[in-house]
Image: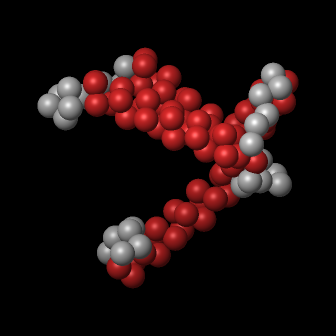
Amino acid sequence: MERNSIQELVKDFVLKNKYETTIEIRMLDLLSELGELSKELIISSNYGKLEISTEEKIKDEFGDVLFSLICIANLLEINMEQQIIKTLDKYKKRLITKGRISSN
């Protein structure tokens, strides 16, 4: 698999720091990090009462989510750049045929 530079950066970090684990553990980590990001967004917006400000905590949690997602893509040998291009093409076709990007 050919990875983009961000995926290579994460792969090198994981290998150098002996941070390899199973895809199941990476998935649990991703879900945990998504929960932490959600919590920070809720706190920042005071449960939807305020406009969200992109505070450092939110940026940090977003980075953690991204790291976990990239680790999963690497384990599955998915080139994230190629996949997002493919997904955007799919959404464009849906917009043309259905007027929306959702599959329903």
Identify which residue is drawn at 42% across, 31% down.
37
Q: Nearer the viewer, residue 27 or 78?
A: 27
Identify which residue is drawn at 58% across, 41% down.
28
The vertical placement of 56 against 27, above or below, is above
Asked if one can make out residue 89 in the rendered structure from this viewpoint, the answer is yes
Outermost top residue: 56
Where, by quadrant of the figure, is residue 69 drawn?
A: top right
Left of 77 or right of it: where is 38?
left
Instruction: Give the number of marks.
Output: 0
Identify which residue is drawn at 77% across, 28% down.
19
Outermost bottom residue: 97
The quadrant of the image that shows the N terminus is bottom right
| Residue 20 picture location, percent across and down | 79, 34
Q: Nearer the viewer, residue 36 or 99?
A: 36
Asked if one can make out residue 95 in the rendered structure from this viewpoint, the answer is no
The vertical placement of 5 against 75, above or below, is above
Q: Nearer the viewer, residue 83 or 39?
A: 39
| Residue 57 picture location, percent across and down | 42, 19
| Residue 15 picture location, percent across and down | 84, 30
The vertical placement of 77 against 100, above or below, is above
The quadrant of the image that shows the C terminus is bottom left
Outermost left residue: 49
Colouring rule applied to residues? secondary structure
Q: Nearer the viewer, residue 95 or 22?
A: 22
Left of 40 or right of it: where is 26?
right
Where, by quadrant of the figure, is residue 82 drawn?
A: bottom right
Identify which residue is drawn at 65% across, 40% down.
26
